[in-house]
Image (spheres, rainbow, N blue to C red):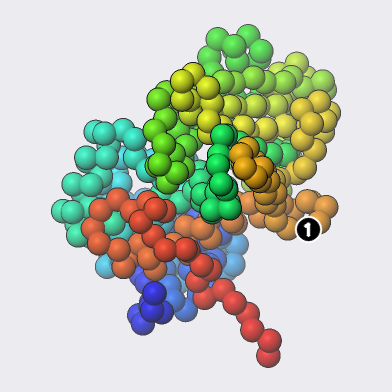
């Protein structure tokens, strides 16, 4: 695809951990122009987006007014709130702005949501794309690419390993993921985000199945947890250590999402999120941040993906950067696409955009 002649005008929607990395990318790449930034909290309204992202003023003020942001002239919105709102997404699309999000939607299995989003795309003459790290890359794009070397496939398994004690997140995110719950509460009330996560991971499984020409007959999710053997300090946003998981409360999460055919899992995602090394050791996954793709078939194929330093000391935080950049780098193709919902199966290989630093 030809290089974009004019800068892509972009709005950053939400300034959490993913949004902050994206703001830096939009500011540093000449192919992008950050024209606006929507924030959820009134406290951030009026602040400079660059200051929120930690790079100093860049001349773009944040607003918590949807009307004000949608009135801006922009090509695409990077939609990165903690929880996606389909009606809000439709409003953005109907305003004539393309939309890229890491919040699921790698494909849309809910027929009602699919119809609403598709109608909004066509009304606005734009497209939308769901992209991220998992789903959006490790759970779907990597297995699909790796499958090209297969003669036959019996099962695909993707392991996600994240040392959550290293992840720079808010305490709200930590508790929404079910950490620090009592074992009684965890058994009676699954974590708040479990239902949301199962939806987006099932979308990702469906995308892999579609690419490989099979039909998943049913989906299932399972959840188990591990308890803290002592109080655990949690690394929160901005480097503070005020969060604490109490001894005897949930300090490790293991989710399992599977697509079944004839009652047997054929595509399976297993996530391991320990907050403590002893839990990671019990589960047999000691890496700070990694994805392992296993294709059982002829031949058996294995792929190990991580990032950062060899010791993994910075990989969990850099995984959020990977999430952001997979969205940013997809934007030239999404902006150029015809109106509608665009999945990875509709796109060419997504390369890094304006990223190569040549020798001087």
Q: Quadrant of residue 75 in the image?
A: bottom left
Q: Residue at x 41, y 79 (%)?
A: 3
Q: Residue at x 23, y 47 (%)?
A: 118
Quarter of the picture containing the N terminus is bottom left
Q: Residue at x 63, y 80 (%)?
A: 357
Q: Quadrant of residue 127 in the image?
A: bottom left
Where residue 19 appears, as percent x and y from the top left, is 50, 55
Q: Nearer the viewer, residue 79 or 304?
A: 304
Is residue 220 found left or right of 230 in the rendered image?
left
Is residue 237 found left or right of 326 in the rendered image?
right
Quarter of the picture containing the C terminus is bottom right
Viewer can see residue 68: no
In the displayed structure, 11 sits above or below 136; it is below
Viewer can see residue 256: yes
Q: Quadrant of residue 229 in the image?
A: top right
Q: Nearer the viewer, residue 313 or 58?
A: 313
Where residue 208 appears, as percent x and y from the top left, is 46, 42
Q: Nearer the viewer, residue 140 or 10?
A: 140
Q: Regarding mark 1 in the picture, which secondary structure is present there?
A: loop
Q: Residues within 10 Å of mark 1 (few under 14, many from 20)?
A: few
Where residue 260 appears, as percent x and y from the top left, is 48, 25
Q: Nearer the viewer, residue 16 or 186?
A: 186
Is residue 299 found left or right of 130 in the rendered image?
right
In the displayed structure, 309 sits above or below 227; it is below
Where residue 224 appears, as percent x and y from the top left, is 64, 19
Would you name the residue on which mark 1 appears? 309
**Number of numbered labels in the structure image:** 1
Residue closest to the far bottom: 360
Q: Residue at x 34, y 35 (%)?
A: 109
């Amino acid at each position: 695809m030809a290089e974009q002649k004019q800068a892509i005008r972009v709005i950053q929607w939400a300034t959490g951990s993913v949004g902050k990395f994206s703001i830096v990318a939009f500011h540093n790449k000449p192919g992008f122009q950050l024209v606006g930034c929507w924030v959820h909290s009134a406290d951030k309204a009026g602040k400079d987006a660059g200051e929120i992202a930690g790079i100093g003023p860049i001349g773009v003020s944040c607003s918590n007014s949807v009307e004000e942001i949608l009135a801006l002239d922009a090509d695409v919105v990077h939609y990165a709130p903690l929880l996606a709102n389909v009606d809000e997404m439709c409003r953005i699309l109907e305003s004539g702005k393309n939309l890229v999000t890491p919040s699921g939607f790698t494909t849309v299995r809910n027929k009602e949501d699919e119809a609403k989003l598709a109608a909004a795309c066509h009304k606005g003459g734009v497209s939308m794309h769901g992209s991220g790290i998992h789903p959006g890359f490790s759970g779907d794009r990597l297995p699909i690419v790796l499958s090209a070397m297969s003669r036959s496939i019996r099962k695909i398994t993707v392991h996600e390993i994240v040392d959550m004690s290293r992840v720079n997140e808010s305490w709200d995110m930590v508790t929404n993921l079910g950490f620090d719950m009592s074992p009684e509460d965890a058994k009676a009330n699954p974590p708040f985000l479990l239902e949301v996560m199962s939806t987006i991971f099932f979308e990702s499984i469906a995308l892999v199945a579609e690419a490989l020409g099979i039909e998943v007959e049913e989906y299932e999710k399972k959840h188990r947890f591990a308890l803290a053997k002592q109080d655990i300090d949690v690394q929160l946003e901005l480097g503070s250590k005020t969060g604490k998981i109490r001894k005897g409360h949930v300090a490790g999460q293991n989710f399992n999402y599977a697509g079944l055919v004839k009652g047997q899992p054929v595509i399976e995602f297993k996530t391991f999120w320990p907050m403590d090394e002893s839990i990671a050791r019990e589960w047999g996954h000691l890496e700070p941040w990694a994805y392992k793709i296993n294709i059982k078939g002829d031949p058996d194929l294995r792929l190990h993906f991580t990032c950062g330093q060899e010791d993994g000391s910075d990989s969990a935080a850099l995984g959020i950067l990977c999430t952001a950049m997979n969205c940013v780098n997809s934007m030239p193709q999404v902006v150029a696409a015809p109106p509608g919902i665009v999945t990875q199966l509709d796109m060419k290989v997504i390369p890094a955009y304006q990223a190569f630093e040549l020798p001087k």
